[in-house]
Image (cartoon, rainbow, N blue to C red):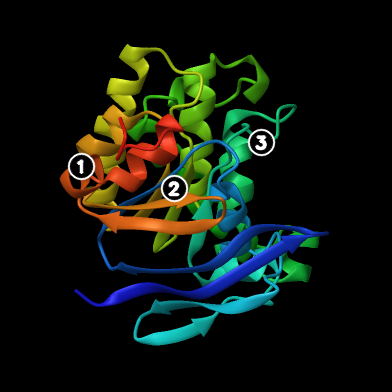
Amino acid sequence: MTAILKVNRLTKSFGGLTAVSNVSMEIKKGELVGLIGPNGAGKTTVFNLLTGIYAPDSGSISLINDDNEITLQGMKPYKICKSGVARTFQNIRLFRELTVLDNVRIAMHKNVNYGLFPGMFHLKSYSLEEKKLFDQCVELLKIFELDHKMNELAKNLPYGEQRHLEIIRALATDPVLLLLDEPAAGMNPAETAQLTETIGWIRKNFNLTILLIEHDMSLVMKICERIYVLDYGMVIASGTPSEINANKRVIEAYLGEDVEDA
């Protein structure tokens, strides 16, 4: 498999604190990779660097899409999204006062083909494109069984459905790389089990590469093929779930003890 994301010696500091230090990763097309670590390890900062919310102090980020290598560092978030990278957030960031349908429609709008004047005067090209957009939005909502709630405000959905809507909104941008930041946060065991199946299904049916931050180790160990482990902003281990599960340095980082003496 060819690489779709290359991260080389990525570093980011805030004042005197180095949040991410010389992080390097390579993710191959079609993989489902986990990014784990204790609280404050720098995981979400890495996501913010990958999506242009933060600019790195040093290092490089490359996305390989359709054999074109795109340099992501220094790009605006909306341009990174157009390049094929979508994400969800640890704290749900839906447009709470808009409907379920409009949350998805806004995400999909980057792909419309009509210009300013057709949009202003509702010309035929506008009407046809908006009908196509509506149908695509409804199709996505049907997949997640949310089509019957398309006219409800996003804020009125149950927590688990809000999580699903955020994933749907990310998928609506037609990404090649999907970044999921703690998608199981706040979910009960039954919801987490359903989400685990959903993530695997999404990856297969949308032909996606997925990078996942998650604290629920049962979810990570079940669906991830490879895992990177951060501690104090540095990659301390990488490998398969079984390799990570047996790694003494990872155990020490999570348990806060010297495993050699344990």
On residue 93, which mark appears? 3
Give the percent coordinates (x, y) of residue 99: 65, 28
Q: Amino acid at mark 2?
A: Gln
Residue occupying image coordinates x 75% and y 27% = 97
Real-space CA distance between mark 1 and mark 2, rounded to the nearest whole angstrom: 45 Å
- Tell which of 83 and 62 is nearer to you: 62
Mark 3 is surrounded, within 10 Å at the Cα level, by few (under 14), some (14 to 19) or many (20 or more) other residues, namely: few
- Tell which of 43 and 66 is nearer to you: 43
Label 1 close to label 2 by CB (< 8 Å): no
Q: Is residue 121 left or right of residue 106?
A: right
User: Circle 2 sits on which residue?
Assistant: 136
Direction front: furthest residue: 261
User: Circle 1 sits on which residue?
Assistant: 246
Q: Amino acid at mark 3?
A: Arg
- Tell which of 260 and 240 is nearer to you: 260
- Tell which of 227 and 175 is nearer to you: 227
